[in-house]
């Protein structure tokens, strides 16, 4: 249990001190990709709590969700339509569903 928390703290510390900035042109793509990644991570935590975690499913879902969300945002930009909002809504709903399931599992423990 301590290893994921250590990774989270280490990642936040590195992100805080690194001078990395994203150009404004890529902000939509990165934000949708981060939402997709967060959805996959929370889905992985949920499946681990339900004892049916599969690392292959997790990794393929993680990368394919990120790429698909960024591609959707890109295609929307090329068409002049804010398609990234569809990804934001879809991943937002899934994030809250996964968080609710994780919360219920922790309360039952």
Image: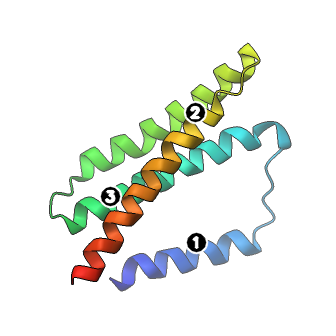
> In the orientation shown, which residue stands out farthest toward the left?
51
Q: Nearer the viewer, mark 1 or mark 3?
A: 3
Horizontal arrangement in the rendering, residue 64 relative to residue 72 (left or right): left
Mark 1: secondary structure: helix
**Residue count near mark 2 (Cα–Cα under 10 Å), binned few <14, some 14–19, many ≥20:** some
Q: Nearer the viewer, mark 3 or mark 2?
A: 2
Tag 1–tag 3 contact (CB < 8 Å): no
**Residue count near mark 3 (Cα–Cα under 10 Å), binned few <14, some 14–19, many ≥20:** many
Residue at 58%, 51% in the rendered image: 34
Q: Nearer the viewer, mark 1 or mark 2?
A: 2
Q: Quadrant of the N terminus?
A: bottom left
Q: Position of residue 57 (x, y in %)?
A: 26, 45
Q: Quadrant of the C terminus?
A: bottom left
Q: Position of residue 105 (x, y in %)?
A: 26, 73
Image height check: is 103 above or below 43?
Answer: below
Compute the Cα span from label 1 to label 2. Answer: 28 Å
Horizontal arrangement in the rendering, residue 66 relative to residue 22 (left or right): left
Q: Quadrant of residue 108?
A: bottom left
Mark 2: secondary structure: helix
Q: Quadrant of residue 85?
A: top right
**Residue count near mark 1 (Cα–Cα under 10 Å), binned few <14, some 14–19, many ≥20:** few
Colour mapping: rainbow
Mark 3: secondary structure: helix
Compute the Cα span from label 1 to label 3. Answer: 18 Å
Q: Name the N-terminal-most of marks 3 and 2.
A: 3
Residue occupied by mark 1: 11
Residue occupied by mark 3: 44
Q: Name the N-terminal-most of marks 1 and 2.
A: 1
Image height check: is 95 above or below 1?
Answer: above
Residue occupied by mark 2: 86
Compute the Cα span from label 3 to label 2. Answer: 22 Å
């Amino acid at each position: 249990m301590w290893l994921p928390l250590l990774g989270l703290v280490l990642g936040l510390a590195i992100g805080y001190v690194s001078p990395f900035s994203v150009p404004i042109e890529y902000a939509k793509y990165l934000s949708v990709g981060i939402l997709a990644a967060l959805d996959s991570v929370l889905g992985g935590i949920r499946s681990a709590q339900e004892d049916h975690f599969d690392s292959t499913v997790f990794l393929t879902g993680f990368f394919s969700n990120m790429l698909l969300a960024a591609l959707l945002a890109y295609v929307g930009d090329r068409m002049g339509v804010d398609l990234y909002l569809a990804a934001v809504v879809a991943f937002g709903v899934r994030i809250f569903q996964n968080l609710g399931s994780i919360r219920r599992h922790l309360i039952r423990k």
